[in-house]
Image (cartoon, helix red, strand yellow):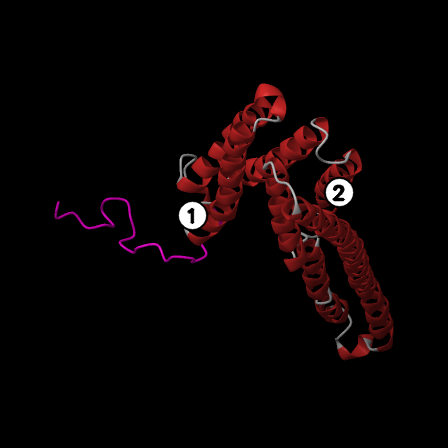
Amino acid sequence: MTGVPASAAGGSGAKPVRGGKLGPAAVNQAGLWNIANILTMVRLLLVPGFVMLLLHNGGYDPVWRSFAWAAFAVAMITDLFDGHLARAYNLVTDFGKIADPIADKAIMGAALICLSVLGDLPWWITGVILARELGITLMRFWVIRHAVIPASRGGKLKTLAQGTAAGMYVLVLTGPLATLRFWVMMVAVVLTVVTGLDYVRQAVVLRRRSLAAERAAVGRTAEALNEAAGSPGAAVGAGAAGTGAAGASGVGASGPAVRLSGGSTPVEPAVSARDAAEAER
């Protein structure tokens, strides 16, 4: 106990709430060396180790392939926990946003390619899965300015099916288990294709909606600005006519000034429309 208040020591005195949402400044305070990022780094380091274990002694040694399966299983388990920990304890960092998907694609891609090289897995399966993963990643960058495509339940099932099937192929299985792993892989391939098409549909819809909202906002802004620009001129003309007709009453000089000041009020909705357009962008 130091006897120094938490506020004097640079803290707020409040404990972070598990699963609570912090502002951008608070999120940026998460250091690089947190548990979520460490798990991601472990998964990245497991990729070359997994490849060496799987291909040791020509890639057909049941013992070494069991070791490779253990490395693959650890990588899949860390994949389940690092993202959850980052969100639950506000440990989201720029490194984690980039490294986590790279680690996911690296371990799965390494497993599929090595299995195809060994002749255990047809190349067309590896091609379909890798093409889908790369295509969806590029598509996310394509629509990131307009919207963020959320992870779907089907996508999570796809990841689970891929990991289970690849893990079964890493092990040396025979008989009914070998047949079972083939059908599990077929389920993974179907989920891969179906969820990939669904992501494409979502991307197209979200991009169209975003572009339509931008066009509508720009139209409202232009209309409001046109009204604001046209109102003072009309007021000046009306004021000039009023001056000629009512000069004897002593209103002539003040009439245009009053109408000009009143004519400036439409600028306020124009500014609001412009701000709304910027917010929708």
**Is the residue under label 1 in contact with that under label 2 (CB below 8 Å)?**
no
Position of residue 171 measured from the top left corner of the image (x, y, whole percent): 58, 37
Q: Using the rendered view, name the quadrant where residue 129 is placed.
A: top right
Q: CA distance from mark 2 to mark 1?
A: 35 Å
Residue at (77, 79) in percent of width and height = 249
Q: Which residues are magenta?
A: 1-24
Q: Which residue is mark 1?
A: 26
Membership of 172 in magenta stretch: no
SS at mark 2 in the image = helix
Q: Secondary structure at mark 1?
A: helix
Q: Main secondary structure of the magenta part?
A: loop
> Mark 2 packing: few (<14 Cα in 10 Å), some, or many (20+)?
some
Across and down, in percent, residue 186 comes to 74, 49
Residue found at x 73% / y 62%: 270
Identify residue for label 2. Answer: 132
Q: Nearer the viewer, residue 24 or 112?
A: 112
